[in-house]
Image (cartoon, grey):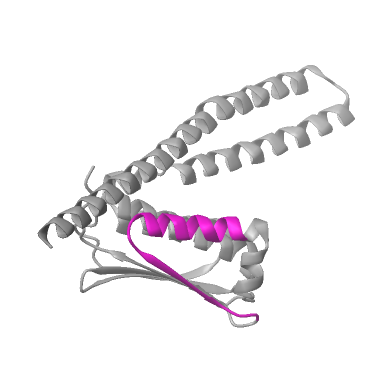
Amino acid sequence: MAGHVAELEAYRSGARALASRILSAQEAERVRVSRELHDDTGQALTLILVRLQLVENMTRDPEVRRELAELRELVVDTLDGVRRLAVQLGPSILEDLGLRSGLEWLVDRVREDAGLQIDLALDSDDGIPPTTAVAVFRVAQEALTNVVRHARATRAEVRLSDEDGVLTLTVADDGVGFDVDEARARPAASVGLFGMAERVALVGGTIELLSRKGAGTRVVVRVPAREEVTT
């Protein structure tokens, strides 16, 4: 019996280590893409803006100047979008200040960018393993992105509670809702749902998706709050 227990514990330890490496690799790739967007793409767009301004200053044709001004506005909007995406891919606030501050930052950005009213209630996040914090944050990010893009909601809520060793994240909205089974059958939608479920499973948690047409959507994530991941 003792041998079986030891084997089971070794298996669990190996699974946790593998999950940690997978999540770390995913985050490292996000950070790499974020930096490339910010540095390479951002600098290229900035250079285009400078060149467009120079060309605009050199011409006297009113029609050409108007077209160039419109093109500069388009490049400015694109540059702003690239910078927002870069920040969303790799927000350092999660590493620096933890899950609670990361979720506050995320909700503030969605409120500002989408004009969505979001109720926020966050319990303590003391002692949460870094890989768990990253997984929960990314699920919240994906869930709120779906609310903004698809739900046509007027308000949403984000709640984080820590009780009896279980960390629970809830993201809910009052939008149009959808048929969960139908969504899982569509490739485009199922990729996002699978990605959330995969992240949660890697840290030993579960995810529940509750929705029906006309009745909003609720995503509930439950993960172990204190179990350290062995690397």
Along the horizontal axis of the image, is 198 left or right of 124?
A: right
Along the horizontal axis of the image, is 220 left or right of 62?
A: left
| Quarter that holds the C terminus | top left
Instruction: Judge by depth and name the residue closer to the eye, 35 or 65.
Output: 35
Q: From this view, report whether residue 174 is shown above or below residue 102.
A: below
Q: Which residue is painted at 53% across and 58% down in the image?
A: 194
Q: Quadrant of residue 189?
A: bottom right
Residue closest to the far bottom: 215
Q: Give coordinates of residue 69: x percent, y percent.
A: 76, 33
Q: Is residue 105 visible?
A: no
Q: Which residues are magenta?
A: 190-213
Q: From this view, report whether residue 55 is shown above or below residue 195.
A: above
Q: Which residue is painted at 28% across and 45% down in the image?
A: 17
Q: Give coordinates of residue 2: x percent, y percent.
A: 10, 59
Q: Check residue 54 for magenta coloring.
A: no
Q: Which residue is painted at 20% across and 53% down in the image?
A: 7
Instruction: Judge by depth and name the residue closer to the eye, 174 or 113.
Output: 174
Image label count: 0
| Quarter that holds the N terminus | bottom left
Q: Which residue is painted at 24% across and 57% down in the image?
A: 128
Q: Is residue 206 visible?
A: yes
Along the horizontal axis of the image, is 169 left or right of 118?
A: left
Q: Give coordinates of residue 148: x percent, y percent.
A: 59, 63
Q: Check residue 192 for magenta coloring.
A: yes
Q: Give coordinates of residue 181: x percent, y percent.
A: 62, 73
Q: Quadrant of residue 8?
A: bottom left
